[in-house]
Amino acid sequence: MTYIYPIQILHLLVSPAHAYFGRAKDGAAEVPTADRDRVKVVAGKGIVGDRFFGKAAHMDAAMTFMAIESLESIAEELDVPPFDPLLARRNVVLRGAQLAPLIGEEFAVESGGEQVRFRGGRHAHPCVWMDRMLAPGAHAAMRGRGGLRCQPLSDGILHRGPALLLSSVPLQPEEAGAAVRPRPGRLP
């Protein structure tokens, strides 16, 4: 059975280099970052032009999806204005999809008349940089809702705008901003 969810792709981030490394107190590196209308995805490699493209250490997690609802919930919990979603440095920021159930599952995104297939890998754990770049407390608040690292299984183009997420497992879009808490004795 295939479950189909209407989503909105809000941002497609591409950056050729890492911005958050070293000590957060020293500030982020100045690297070019683009929020594109469309990106080319290559199976097993990621987004053309991105810092993770074709890197052996990231083949099973070359791209990161994040639900904007997570950032909205975190900002509300921390009682701060909404965050610039690009500061989280996730490749695909979308609205309308719960991502955690996609861990270990294959799914597809249809946008602009094209379909790209993915395999959900693992949670995208936040780094301490989130306290500096978003707000104090954001690092802890993002745990369990920092996004989904995944591997592209097919070539194609992702387009910003209305899209469909096709999943073999049911999702609860209303839970897109909820933190996934680990079971006792397990990491998220």
Image (tube, helix red, strand yellow):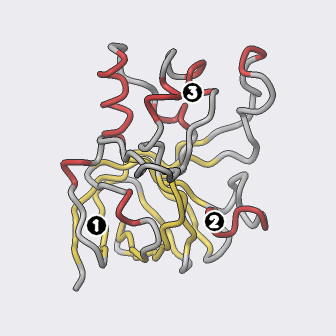
Q: Residue at x 67, y 62 (%)?
A: 48
Instruction: Check disc 3 and give the amino acid type.
Output: Met
Residue sticking out furthest to the bottom? 1
Position of 151 relative to 144 (above/below): below
Instruction: Check disc 2 and give the amino acid type.
Output: Gly
Q: Residue at x 34, y 74 (%)?
A: 113
**Where in the figure is residue 109, as x and y percent of width and height?**
38, 69
Quarter of the figure with residue 80: top left
N-terminal of the pair, mark 1 or mark 2, is 2
Graded by Cα atoms within 10 Å as few (under 14), some (14 to 19) or many (20 or more), the crowding at tag 2 reads: many
Alpha carbons under labels 2 and 3: distance apart? 24 Å
Label 1 near label 3: C-beta < 8 Å? no
Q: Which residue is mark 2?
A: 46
Residue sticking out furthest to the front? 185
Q: Nearer the viewer, residue 173 or 103?
A: 103
Q: Which residue is mark 1?
A: 164
Label 2, secondary structure: give it.
strand
Q: Which residue is mark 3?
A: 130
Label 1, secondary structure: give it.
strand
Position of 17 relative to 43 (above/below): above
